[in-house]
Amino acid sequence: MQLSFLPLYISYPSWIHPQLFPSIPILNLIRWYGLMYIVAFSIAYSILKKVMTEGMLDSASTKATEDELFSFLTTGIIFLLIGARIFSTLVYDTSGIYWHKPWLIFWPYDDIGHFTGLAGMSYHGGFIGGAIGIVFWCKTHNKPLLSWIDAMAIAIPAGYTFGRIGNFFNGELYGKVTTKPWGIIFPGAEKYSLSIDWVKQVAEQAGMDISQNSTLINLPRHPSQLYEALFEGLVLFLIIWFLRKKKPFDGFLTSVYIVGYGFFRFIIEYFREPDADIGYRITVEKTASIARTTSLLNISTGQILCFMMIVGGILFGLLCWKKQKLDT
């Protein structure tokens, strides 16, 4: 029996703000999200150094150096950021403004001149951009491509973990409404009227005090950013890390990463709220709100892209396996 006075949700910590020092104007531009990017890239570099010492990046005639490693990662990061920003603005933005004014893609100020940074980055765009950068670097430096991208496939998930933690600190990319005890009330989430039956029902099931909320209420959400940090980040990293010395052919770890990320993200998308202005690309079951759990056949943009990743990762692995067979 559920006890009505027992809250079955978690309030978003009041001490967390997008800025590290929100009360100090001169330091107001330093944000958790940007800091998490720095942490992510630092961890990725440390992991790359580790696999370099194990000989994964050595070619038949030369050993890899730290200078090459830094150049490799830096190139990948630059292309990743460019791809993530372009993909986010041109694919996920529905206003069409970036198609008509493309210079705004990298313009970090609003209409009145306030610095806003580059809010809005797409993982799939970053994946494409980063892949282009890595291929470009390997070709221009005459390095074995499959060995180097395998090394990057080990490093990416560990760094990605902190990127999603940054999203959590920003209070963004939260999930759908839930009555699970680990549901979190995010301050920036959409509020709903208690006059709506399903809203009142969820609030009561979560043990929320609705006596003082005569109009709008903020409901608990799945912390989907933390789900992604755990599965697409930590769990996927551990899988690839333990496979790194057992890979049957070059390119195998990259294939595992692509398929693994696509699989985990596809599942987690069912708990994550789609962008309000896009909704679902494929809709089988219509509901009063996209914030509620819907049919498994309702497919989001992210799920379509993840399905393409899964198929592409399998095909990539098969091509790499066939290449090794032909070479031997």
Image (cartoon, grey):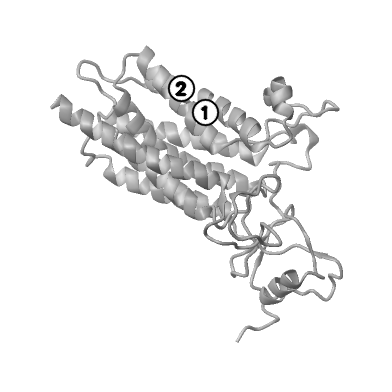
Residue 104 pos. (x, y %) = 72, 24
Residue 105 pos. (x, y %) = 68, 25
Q: Nearer the viewer, residue 168 or 110?
A: 110
Residue 73 image-quadrant placement: top left
Compared with 25, 208 (above or below) is below
Q: Which mark is residue 283?
A: none
Verify CB contact (< 8 Å) between mark 2 and mark 1.
yes
Q: Which mark is residue 133?
A: 2
Q: Nearer the viewer, residue 172 or 275?
A: 275
Q: Residue type at mark 2? A: Gly
For the question of whether residue 157 can be seen, the reply is no
The residue identified by callout 1 is: 80
Q: Secondary structure at mark 2?
A: helix
- The alpha-carbon separation of the residues under discs 2 and 1 comes to 7 Å
Left or right of residue 19, residue 262 in this image: left
Q: Which residue lies at the image location 47% right of the left edge and 28% below the top edge?
A: 130
Quadrant, the N terminus:
bottom right
Q: Which residue lies at the image location 61% right of the left edge and 30% below the top edge?
A: 85
Q: Which residue lies at the image location 32% right of the left edge and 14% below the top edge?
A: 142
Q: Residue type at mark 1? A: Leu
Mark 2 vs 1, N-terminal side: 1
